[in-house]
Structures are given as C-alpha cells and as structure tokens.
Amino acid sequence: MTALLEVRDLRTQFQTEDGFVKAVDGVDFTVESGKTIGIVGESGCGKSVTCLTIMGLNERRNTTSSGEVLFNGEEILGASGSRLRSLRGKEIAMIFQDPMTSLNPVHTVGRQLVETVLLHNDISKAEARARAREALKEVGIPRAEQRVDDYPHQFSGGMRQRAMIAMAMINDPKLLIADEPTTALDVTTQAQILSLMQKLQEDHGTAIVMITHDLGVVAETAHEVVVMYAAKVVERGTVDAIFTAPQHPYTWGLLGSLPRLDAEIDRLAQIPGQPPSLLNPPRGCRFHPRCAYVMDVCREKVPELMGVSHDAAHEQACFLDEETKTREAARLFAATMAAGTSG
Amino acid sequence: MVQYLVRRLLWAVVLFLAVTIVTYVIFFLVPANPARLAAGQAATPERVALVEERLGLNDPIYEQYWGFLKRLVFDGSLGESFVDRSSVNDEIFRAAPITASLVFGAMILVLVISVPIGILSALRPRSVLDRVAMTYVLLGISLPSFWVALVLSYIFGFKLGWTPIAGYCEVVSVPQAANCGGFGDWAYHMVLPWLALAIVQAGIYVRFVRAEVMDTMTQDYVRTARAKGAPERKVMKDHILRNALLPVITILGMDIGLLLGGAIFIETVFGLNGLGGTAIRSIGQFDLPVLQGVVIFGAVAIILFTLIVDLVYAWVDPRIRLT
C-alpha cells in the first residue's frame, strides 16, 4: 500500500539579496493515512517552509524546489496551478499559527467557510451554508447557527482556531497540515484544540502533519516524529523511540530544555548558541558549533541519516558511537521519568 | 449611531466658528481699506467714509462678526459683496457646480488610473511596468498642476485642436446668451481640466494603492485563502482589494473635501470660473463676505466628506463601530 504522503529529498531555496537560502535541504518523510506525524525544531529550521512547499504556497518568484512530493502516489511538486488549487482545501488542508490574523477581517466566518465549500463542490449556496453551520457545530462553537454570521473579531482566539479547523475540515480532506496550531493560544485552550484535532482525526480518518516546536504537543498527538535542525532532518522515529531512546544530541537538547516542575533550578536548561544562518551554514554537521559532544569528524563530514541498530524505523544523523548515545538517552529518560512520577 | 452623528455635528459647529473667526481676524490684520477699493479710485474721502459707514466697516470686529453670524443663522444668508452688493449665496451657487464638476470628474479619473496601475505594480514589483509606474508617481508628485494643465491645453487644445482650450458649459439651466450647453458640451469642455487634475493627483494614489496591496498580500488571511484553493483572481478580488482599498477611501474623501474649496491653478488655466477664481478675485478686492463664503463652503465640504468617509468605513469594515 502506498503511503498518503511521501516526501523524498525535498529541497527548497529562496533567492535573497544576500544569496541563496537553503530553507529545506534534503528532507524525507512519509505520512500514512489516519496517522499523525510531528515535525519538531526551532524557529527557522525549515519546518514551515517544508509544508508550504508541499502545498505549493511558496512565493513563486524567488523560490525553487526540487525532490519529490507524492500525494496518493501522484507527484504534486511542480504540478500545475489548477491541479494544486483542486487539491488545496479539498484533499490537503492547512491551518496556521496565528488564528487572529488568519481569517479575513472583513468577511463573516460563515462566508469564509462557504467560500471553501463552494470552491470545491458544485452545490447551492444554501447547502454550503448548512454545511458551514454543521462544521462550526462539529468543532464546538456554541450557538453555531448565530455565530456563523459573526465576524472574526467577534470570536476569541481559541474560537477562531476552531473556526480555522472547521474551515480546513469542511471538505473532509485526507491530509491536514497544522503549522504550529496551538502556539498563539493560551495553555488551557491549547489542550482543547489538540483534543479537538484528535477527535476529528478519529472521526474522519484524516492524516495530520503537526508542525511544532513544542515537544509536549508532539508527545500528546503524534505517532511519528521528525526532528529538523537547520533545514535538515537530524532524527526520525516513532514517538516512543524519540522520547525513550533519543539518539541525536540536538534531540537531547530539546528534551532537556523542557521545563520541569520537580527540580529547584534557577535557570531553564537550554541549548547554547543560536541556530545557524541558512545562508551560510556550518561545514560538516550543522549542529557541531552548539554540540557538547563535538568531535573532529563532525567539523568535516556531513552525517547521513542512518538506522539505529535495534530499531530500523528509528533513524538519526550523528557520528557519536552508539554506546554513548544509549547511555545519554537512558540518563535523560530516567530524569524525565523522575519528573513524571514526582510531578 | 445617532449619538455619534450629533457629536460630529457639534464638532462641525466648533470647527465652523474657528475657521470663520480666523478668516475675519486675518482680513482685518491686512492693512488695506475695502471701502476705498469698493468706492473706486476717483472717490473723494467723504465718499469713502460713506461707503465705510454703509458696509459697517467702522464697527468693531466682533460686532461685524456677530452681524455676519446672525445673518447666516437667521436668514441663511452669507451677506452681500462689498464690491457690487450682489448676494454671496448667488455667487457660491454659481461657482460651486463648476468646481464640483472639475473635482468629481477628476477624482473618478484618478481612481480609474491609479487602482489598476497600483495593483499591477504591486503584483510585479521591480518589473518594467512597476518602474514606469513609479517614474510616473515621481512626476505626478513633482510636476506643478498648472504646468501640466498648460502643456495639455497647448498640445491637445491648441496644436491638435481636439478639445476646447478654455470655458465652461452648463449642463442644466443653460443661460439664453450661452453659446454652448448640455451634457455633451459640458463633458467636452471638462476633458482637459479633468485630465490635468487627475494626472497630478493620481501619482500619489498609484503609490498608495501599490503600497496597500503589497502590504495586504503578505497578510496571513491571504495565505489562508490560497490554502483553501481559491484562484488568484478571487484572492485579489475578495481578500486583498477589499482590505487594501479601505485606507484609500480615507485620503480620497479628504482630497475631495479639500479640492472642493477650489482647485485654483487648474481653474485659472482653463478659464473655469469656479470657487478658486471667486476666492482669488475676492482676495484681490478685499471682498470679505465673498471670501468668507468660499471659506465656509470649503470647510463644510471637508467636514461633510470626512463624515462620509467615516460612515463608509463603518459600512465596509465590520471592525469599526461608530460610537
């Protein structure tokens, strides 16, 4: 059976006044129907651009992409504008980080939902409106019959994100790309939005690509995780593998910098340094200037993604010997578990 | 809403008082004697004194101003000209349609020119079209309107003979003595003045539309629209333009109000005897009542169009509530 979405060796670069920025540099991953994949990484690591490239939504003028994006076995990277438009909003939907600015302020929420329906379905306006009301009800908007005629500014942040999700799900897409859907929301709302997305996934069998920098979100929602650093995938595996036996020092850094409630500490742990410039990335392993385990080889050669010996589905790109990795991973896991039990 | 309108109306009254008082004070600070001018060069000092008495120029300023206010409020009259005792109301009603013809026609032309060019420029920044448009913007902002008007009337009116060089034709109530009239003649005579005013004004509007469209194109909701699968035409029409043209309404309303007070240069070049001409003549003759009439008309036009802008804004942008 072919996967729903297969991304192979995806590369995207932007032409800027200072030169070419390789925003995505050889990314591979696969999304199975009905599953959730989490793409994790710092700001500017290329995770959003990866998804915009899949959707064909990058600025055409200064962007070039190569590689393969297979949706249901069909190559959609570089597909015609009309083919992409017929996929967008119908087969592949997307929701964005900031619900405050992602809805058009001068149209009612209902009108924006109706627009999405009518773009892809040959039905009457009244039927589309009925669907819009249903969709708002399904995402838990109270009094949806009346709220459908409200303008976005009359909705709270969480409600707007619900409306965005309703708009994304209204044509029953096979794939939902969620670009940091909870980042702009407060914590209690975050949890509601995530469980709403999980419920919709169960009801509709939608596959989700969840882009986030929040490992908590990944742990709660994803089946598989892709960790990106500086436009490259540095580690990939099932959510269990990533959390119980992380292999890459960058992943350790991400896990180690999660806030802990159990220990009295003055400062949160952090990964030292800044993410590198993609205009002129470091030679060798891109993480080496910030890595505590750096070796000579890291400065010279680029590590390839390779399977971990006991788990073929778990891949990582680091030169460290497996013994060190296993030891560090176990130490980190023990600390996390300690936090879990006492917290 | 009603409360809002009442408050706006009160402000308009305050603004009206301020504008008229300032005009009065400035007028009396100028060291010249309107009575002398009105009585004529050959007048004896006795005659001038008589005229002063007649025009009430010997009364203190505040009494003159009070008289002016009383006449305006109770009789709806702007008074009589110092020079020929004709009614200022009549003069304003004669001149205002001419200026209004010029301004509204030209502003429609401004929108017709600037909105498409601004959009195309924004869609292809740094393209040949964009560079040509930006050069035009620079010229439009830099060139004086009377120069553009003169060049147009020289080329199209004089050399090519396509249009009249000067003059105005009434659309309705054509006077007996007039040698032209009706809508066709009116438009035919207005073509060059419209073009001249529009060419100069449109430059800034092209720049403005371009900037607003470019800014709106980067908004998240535009990306959302594309992510829904909306075609570019629809994205532009439903999602970009409606938001981008909101601020254009503001400056359009303000400019119309401002220009209705008289587009002096264009009117002069094309021999349109509108409010601009009236204002200049009244200043030259120290004809305070007529000048005051033009000033009041201009102030009312600005107040009215700012109010219209606010009402339109509230209607177009659901986030704005008039309270």
Image: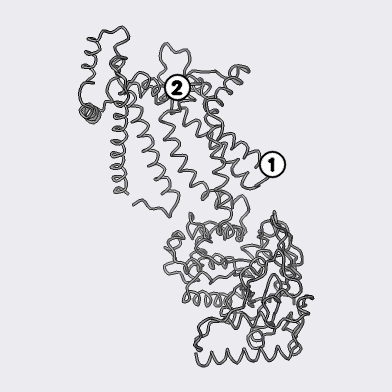
Number of numbered labels in the structure image = 2
Q: Residue at x 70, y 79 (%)?
A: A235
Residue B53 at x, y percent in the picture: 21, 17
Measured as percent of width and height from the top left, residue B209 is found at 55, 44
Residue A260 appears in the rendering? yes
* Residue at 54% in and 81% down: A268
Q: Is residue B312 above or below residue A256?
A: above
Regarding mark 2 in the picture, which secondary structure is present there? loop
Q: Is residue A81 something that shows in the picture?
A: no
Q: For mark 1, what is the residue?
A: B128
Of B237 and B250, nearer the camera is B250
> In front: B134, or A177?
B134
Residue type at tag 1 = Val
Circle 2 chain: B
Relative to A177, residue A60 above or below: above
Q: Amino acid at mark 2?
A: Val
- Sequence-first disc among 2 and 1: 1
Image position of B46 with respect to B226: above or below: above
Q: Which residue is mark 2?
A: B171
The quarter of the picture where residue A253 lies is bottom right
What is the x, y in percent for residue B186? 49, 22
Q: Percent position (x, y) of residue B195?
A: 55, 28
Q: In this picture, is A289 found above or below A144?
A: below
Q: Mark 1 packing: few (<14 Cα in 10 Å), some, or many (20+)?
A: few
